[in-house]
Amino acid sequence: MRIGEMVHRTGVSERLLRYYEEQGLLAPTRLASGYRVYGDADVDTVRRIRILLAAGLPTATIAQVLPCIRDDGPTLAPVCPDLVAQLRRERERITHAIENLQASQGLLDTVIAAGPAVSEG
């Protein structure tokens, strides 16, 4: 399928599909004319990419993780032995980022509470 059909089937813009290709996440074949041609498996790959992005993984990590992930019903399952440890490290990174954001939120709450009462709206 060409890129327009891929956009329709995945809901991902042409720009993002090109970005995924640039990042090494997708590898469509190219016609002599230069047009990209995607297979049905690429639709599944885009779904996996979207899930991993939503989980907070950067594209560089996703490029490493994709070959080690398989579909297990509606979820993804690791198939490479080292992948679980890598995902645990990523989860720890995300946990620290959340803690930092919560601390920032607390500081802002303190500043806001110290200010004059202003109606929101």
Image (cartoon, rainbow, N blue to C red):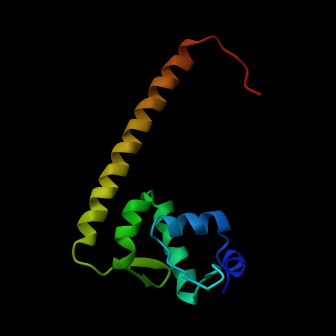
Q: Position of residue 96 (x, y in %)?
A: 33, 44
Question: Residue, x 27% and y 57% (percent of image)?
Answer: 89
Q: Which picture quadrant has residue 90?
A: bottom left
* Rendered-image quadrant of the C terminus: top right
In the picture shown, does residue 89 fall above or below 11?
Answer: above
Question: Residue, x 42% and y 59% (percent of image)?
Answer: 57
In the image, 36 versus 112, the foreground residue is 36
Question: Residue, x 45% and y 24% (percent of image)?
Answer: 107
Lateral position of residue 69 relative to residue 14, left or right: left
In the image, 110 versus 15, the foreground residue is 15
Lateral position of residue 31 relative to residue 98, left or right: right
What is the residue that sits farthest to the front in this orientation?
32
In the picture shown, does residue 33 fall above or below 86?
Answer: below
Q: Which picture quadrant has residue 18?
A: bottom right
> In the rendered image, is residue 86 in sight?
yes
Question: Residue, x 22% and y 72% (percent of image)?
Answer: 82
Lateral position of residue 87 relative to residue 66, left or right: left
In the image, 68 versus 116, the foreground residue is 68
Q: Position of residue 10 (x, y in %)?
A: 64, 76
